[in-house]
Image (tube, rainbow, N blue to C red):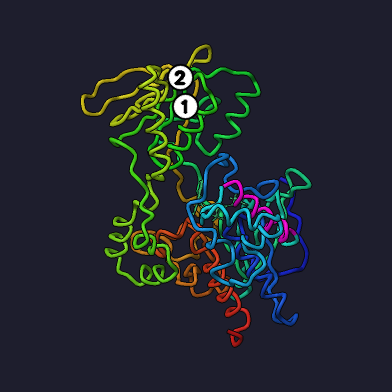
Amino acid sequence: MKSPLAESDIVHDVLGIGFGPSNLALAIAVEEHNTGSPREERLSACFLERQPRFGWHRGMLIDDATMQVSFLKDLVTLRNPTSDFSFLCFLREQDRLIDFLNQKTLFPLRAEFHQYFEWAADRMGHLVEYGSEVTAVEPVRDEDGRVAFFDVFSRDPGEPGRTIRRRARNISVAMGLEPHVPPGLELSERVWHNSRLIPGVSELTAAGRSVRRAVVLGAGQSAAEAVDYLHRSFPEAEVCAVFAKYGYTPADDSPFANRIFDPDAVDVYFGSPAEVKQSLIDYHRSTNYSVVDMELIEALYATAYREKVAGHERLRFLNVSRIRDVRDRADGPLDIAVEFLPTGEHHVLEADLLVLATGYRPRDLTRLLGESAKLCLRDDGDALRVGRDHRVETAPEVTAGVYLQGGTEHTHGLTSTLLSTTAVRAEEIHRSLLKGRFADAV
Ligand code: FDA
């Protein structure tokens, strides 16, 4: 590898790793602060994103999929309802405000929210470097061993093989989750995680490849969406949903349960002992995990019933079942061995495509942070100790900050990986950054 190139002598107050909605919201919070502050009170921020341009779960931008969070929980409104980075301001700029309102919904299309994110990201373009995957974060020690800065290394988008080094007082890690592939299964040309559903289907269609049978593993929202999407995309194909449950479970989006996503709920959760935290997650798991919007459940059921009436069933639900083995024969279809759990009976489905809608997992920070990870304190269960301000607790010699957005369900609860408190969390981190930088200012 070529020796790293130093960006410049700039020391950023905050360097964001990943530029999804979490760090985008932080960028806007910093920008709005800077706009209203004298030069000496401004924060220098830079964000590094590995994708070549902004993209929010592009592989699942299904045309009719809607958001599962109110548009008022956009990048800014809960922090600053007067911000011109709100979804409503975006709509006004697109000349769609009144058309949107006439729909009488709080839940825009996912594709429309993506447009909104892109619009906001474009306006923050001067703070972001795309095509810049962060590969390492190293502590910078002075002669007394104190760590006041981190050096962040990222791929140079302009020159393959070269890394760029940037220095920062704080890092904000918001790298999102990574697709989970269950043990024993492997991704291939015909076995995809649902995160590449849309490009995968486009490629198949463009190549004129026929799909006679597609199998989807999983029973969550993404699984149900994939089943529906494949059924629509390949009108001749049989689509089989395989899952261990008896039937899909509806997402609990009732008003009292929804309060678990309130900013106040984060306070309550944060201050609770471990067993109360666990019970809150268990009680309210069905707001987010392995659940499906009721409308989609009903639509899938109606489709399956319609096909039954017509005597041509191409939507099948293999419930109480697991995939035990997948043989990927180069010259033939995939052989997918499915076990019906009540009897242990196996049968083999010949399929052209298997979509693993098997969820996402937090990314392993230890590898990326390397030496810096050793400076982060952990609790008895080996989880990172994180303060209410989302700052990781670090060894005493460290004054540089590591902020986490995501991967903090153990400390901040269910909203950690979701959008509900994105704007508020950005404000909390922003305040904490200001406090660290200008101790008396906040
Ligand atoms: P996000 O994953 O969006 O962004 C992380 C970014 O970091 C990515 O752009 C990635 O490329 C980048 N990155 C990773 N590693 C890097 C590295 N080493 N260097 C540089 N960049 C790196 N939640 C909700 O509340 N309501 C909803 O409606 C939905 N809908 C939804 C749909 C689908 C299909 C999925 C998969 C998820 C949701 N979610 C959701 C949950 C989702 O996690 C949430 O919406 C946000 O994506 C979280 O934003 P982040 O910025 O934290 O992560």
- Quarter residue 48 falls in: bottom right
Overall secondary structure of the magenta stretch?
helix
The numbered disc on residue 351 is 2
What element does badge 2 sit on? strand
Is residue 16 magenta-colored?
Answer: no
Q: Quadrant of the C terminus?
A: bottom right
Mark 2 Cα-neighbour bin, 10 Å: few <14, some 14–19, many ≥20: many
Residue 364 picture location, percent across and down: 49, 51
Direction front: furthest residue: 102
Residue 353 picture location, percent across and down: 49, 24
Q: Is residue 76 visible?
A: yes
- Quarter residue 34 falls in: bottom right
- Residue at 66% across / 54% down in the picture? 96
Which span of residues is magenta-colored?
110-125
Q: Is residue 368 visible?
A: no
User: Where is mark 1, residue-wise?
Assistant: 354
Amino acid type indicated by mark 2: Ala
Residue 68 picture location, percent across and down: 48, 52
Mark 1 Cα-neighbour bin, 10 Å: few <14, some 14–19, many ≥20: many
Q: CA distance from mark 2 to mark 1?
A: 7 Å
